Amino acid sequence: MLLALTLPRINEHMLSAVVAAVHPSAGAELAVGAKLVDLTVDLTAIAAQDCPPVSHFRMVVRERACLRELAVAPVNEIAVGTRIALFSTDPHELLDAEPVRELRVAIAGILMQAPAWSGGGR
Amino acid sequence: MSLVPLRLGTLAVAGYDVVRSGVRWLRDEGHACRVGELVAYCNLRLAPTASAPAGAAPFAEEARDFQVGLATRVGGRLHRAHDASRGGFIDRLAEHTVWMPNHVIGHVQCRPSERPAGVDPDGETLELMLVAGRRVTEIAEDRSGFLTGWHDRVRAWWGEGEAPVGTLLGYGICEQLGVFRGESPAFADWFGAVAGPAQVVYVPDNVLVPCAAVVADQCRRTADEAEAIRADVTHSIATGPVVPTPADWMFVSALISALLRSPLTERCDVPMRRGLAQADVPDAVVLSLNAEPPGILRHRRLGYRLQCHAYRMSDAGPAVRSWIERDFEHVARSVADIGCDFRALADRVRERTTTALLVMNTRSTSGFETFHSYAPFDRPLGNMLGSVRAKELNLMLHDLARERNVSIVDNDAIAAELGATHLPDGVHNSATMQAELRREILHILRGRGIAGFAARPSR
């Protein structure tokens, strides 16, 4: 069975997200709880003059699956609804059919550990 | 029906003439005023007379943005005097008109039975709310409205009688902006709720984030240490590898100016109707747990700590960003570290004053999360997940409350009661929530016996 992962609308105002990190490689067999991608959602465009909410999220898998194709890489900015990856329940399954549903994932807000402009962490 | 004149009443400062601008109306002709409603304002200036005392004049740092809001003691229909306002510079510059107690700016039309008890229609029928703003730089001028401009501190005070002026300081992040300044006009919500004599002060976080470590450093910093920081910053940016732009200089000037002040230990001049008084250091300060980041900047040589919002630093010039990267290290801070910072701050404050510490806690949940298990996330969870960290911070605050008599302004519980739509991102709150937070702060102040913040009699 083929499963798709598209970028969900995590926040009602978000239009896109920046891929901060991609954890597995294509071909990896993922157990429940495996990390998938880290995302940064920046709502600056909505409130440019005000304190812009910037949030970071991690998506993790909630079901066993094999990662077959990755459509994104770090620093890519992707719109809501964009395909992130394609999975299959059988690692040898052909990829010529349409995905039957979305991959089940969990999303959590995570902390950014150090700002990009800092001199490094301790 | 009767017409009650809106009379300015006494406002006197020994040794000075109080000079005012023309009146600028906040309400239209015919407006149905409530008792206690701010209807107009003027700009003010203290002009020294021959008998002015020697030394620095009062309001030396706020002289250009000193105003008075005028509130009617009587409810009814407003009739504005045709000559009260002439517009243009006449109404912006306090140059031409000396404050006259018997001057009438208009009238309120009401039934005699509707006049509140104790209001003398031949006496002071206007209540005064005085305000002042300290400009970040004197050239940042904006006299377009009531307390408009770029200020590193704004305050309002009111009340009568001989009792000392109670002072509340809001010194947190942007979540406090609406709580303290409120809706237009600025500070009107506090003025309407509190009898006084009271002062409410707000220090914005436009450039410097007031986390506990930074605030504690401000309280204990000596004049020599401040001078060393000023000299070091100037040298480092001027001689650094990146030529500073005007934006760099403006940013770092505002930043260092904010860093080297200490709002918790500042005393303010407060002219009242009865004369000039001086408010002591704040009787209470409200800090923000949301000001505590997972990491802070520490100067590699001088050791002082600094924190700015990331989006502000992104807007700073290239020389500032280069300075930060060269001269600062990023220090990760656990919840325990933050607790130590708060304890050090509380102890430092108690060495010198009786200032009550109030801290707004943080929203402990997130409406954006969908996970069902913590297993996929790295330990310790408080370093990884924002909602776990928020819970740990709030628990730390409860320990602090027990150990150091800190009061918690329960932002988290209020948001839960009102619903997520009133605090969608955990920081930026609705007007309803801001009003509820003000009520909660007043409840705490009254419970702690902070003078000046008793409720007004019902009008």
Image (cartoon, coloured by chain):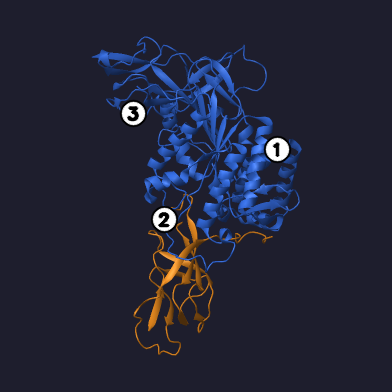
Farthest-out residue, top:
B122
Answer left or right for A14 relative to B156: left
Residue topped by disc 2:
A46
Residue topped by disc 1:
B220
Secondary structure under tag 2 reads loop
Q: CA distance from mark 2 to mark 3?
A: 32 Å
Residue topped by disc 3:
B27
x%, y% of residue B403? 62, 40
Q: CA distance from mark 1 to mark 3?
A: 46 Å
Q: Quadrant of the N terminus of chain B?
A: top left
Image colour assigned to chain B: blue
Q: Nearer the viewer, mark 1 or mark 2?
A: 1
x 47%, y 55%: residue: A53
x%, y% of residue B119? 36, 13
- In the figure, A63 relative to B258: above or below? below
Nearest the eye: B193 or B30: B193
Farthest-out residue, left:
B1
Residue B259 in view: no
Q: Quadrant of residue B378?
A: bottom right
Amino acid type for the residue under numbered disc 1 = Arg
Determine the chain carrying the residue at label 3: B
Tag 2: Cα neighbours inside 10 Å, few (<14), some, or many (≥20)?
A: few
Secondary structure under tag 3 reads loop
